[in-house]
Image (cartoon, rainbow, N blue to C red):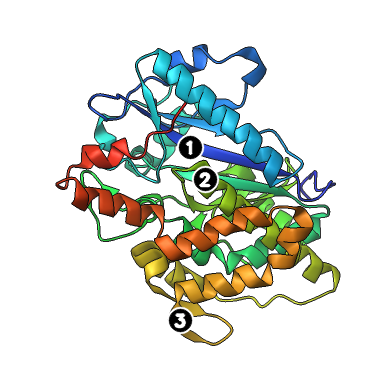
Amino acid sequence: MLDHAFTGPPFTVGIEEELMILDPESLDLAQEIEPLLASVPSEWEGQIKPELFSAVLEIATRPCAGVNEAGEELAKLRALVARLAGERGLAIGAAGTHPFARWEEQVIVDRPRYRELISDLGYIARRELIFGTHVHVAIAGADRAVYVADGIRRYLPLLLAISTNSPFWRGHPTGMMSSRVPVFRQFPRQGIPPHYGTWEIYSHRVETMMRSGAIEDYTYLWWDVRPHPKLGTVETRVCDQQTSLAGTLALAALITSLARRLCVLHDTEEPLVEYPSELIDDNKVRAALRGMEGRLVDFRAGHHVPAPELAKRLLEELAVDAAELGIARHLETVWEILREGTGARRQLASWERNGRDPREVVRGLIVDA
């Protein structure tokens, strides 16, 4: 079986954010990752990284004791990259897509993994001009980690709905709250993962793909949630990138609280229902289209209900777990989203308010130093 590091301590947290490098005048993407990387202070080395395109950077916290500590570090990272960008006449933005940029104009980062990705997937990879928030939660025990990933699987559409922040693509509203979803949907091995059940089954299936030459290692499984054996975490990858730090921490708190709840259920030997992938995927499409303003399948009731109804029930069910983890205050931001709308709704409001000028939408996505 695969080697793993699911040894704890449990519920430590790591957060990754994919951010835009912007020209502050044109508000288009700027191909400036290399100068920015060269200016990163040594103490932050490895926490500010390139992605596929030269106009994208990733910031990543170290493993932190919890969401609160991760939030403090993420705030410093955001401020640092915004300052470094400002010193070079650039700006940093945050959302699931850039409202008007075109993928054809983007420069691929000169790194072996990205060159290989373009060589393997071509047009599919070249179109991947999208930005996500990834949350890692450490889990003690390999079977427990697979149980947690399997358990989060049914909540992926709801997490996407809460996080929707990409209503534009190539200068136009798409009619979707998450335009990021259909772009990434072209990739292989993405979206709703299989229900694995046990670490033995997960290991066998990953090793089968590796032996066949389909993938180099498990990191080429780009599922919306996946066990990460090397890090000893369950990584949730379904969320659109959030413009505000508070939005990112709300998602991290929700996911971490859910992971804790699932660990409790695992330890009490509560069986998980293996919901059909096609039903969860149908829910995900509904979430991408309408976000929190639409209806999702309630697996318990077996019919559609308003998305906020599902979110309220989940928040109530996770209240004890959030309190135990000391992160209940971050879930208040989720309640705010239910009242005021997601980032996608704010972007659309800016579009209408400012004469349908996509540049003004981008201006509202800039991260302050």
Relative to 239, residue 121 above or below: above
User: Marks 1 and 3, Cα distance to the nearest angstrom?
Assistant: 32 Å
Residue denoted by label 3: 305
For residue 358, which quarter of the picture? top left
Q: Are marks 1 and 2 in contact (CB under 8 Å)?
A: yes
**In the picture provided, is 3 more to the left or to the right than 68?**
right
- At mark 3, the secondary structure is strand
Using the image as rendered, state which of residue 238 and residue 167 is in the foreground. Answer: 167
Looking at numbered disc 1 in the image, what kind of residue is underneath it?
Glu
Residue denoted by label 2: 133
Residue denoted by label 1: 18
- At mark 2, the secondary structure is strand
**In the picture provided, is 315 more to the left or to the right than 327?**
left
**In the picture provided, is 238 more to the left or to the right than 56?**
right
Image coordinates of residue 332 in percent, x first then y, are 58, 58
Residue name at image x 34 percent, y 22 percent:
31
**One can see residue 201 in this view:** no
Residue name at image x 19 percent, y 45 percent:
354
**One can see residue 47 in this view:** yes
Residue name at image x 39 percent, y 25 percent:
54
Image coordinates of residue 294 in percent, x first then y, are 38, 72
Using the image as rendered, state which of residue 344 and residue 175 is in the foreground. Answer: 344
User: Marks 2 and 3, Cα distance to the nearest angstrom?
Assistant: 26 Å
Disc 3 packing (10 Å; few <14; some 14–19; many ≥20): some
Relative to 44, residue 269 above or below: below
Looking at numbered disc 2 in the image, what kind of residue is underneath it?
Thr
Relative to 123, residue 114 above or below: above
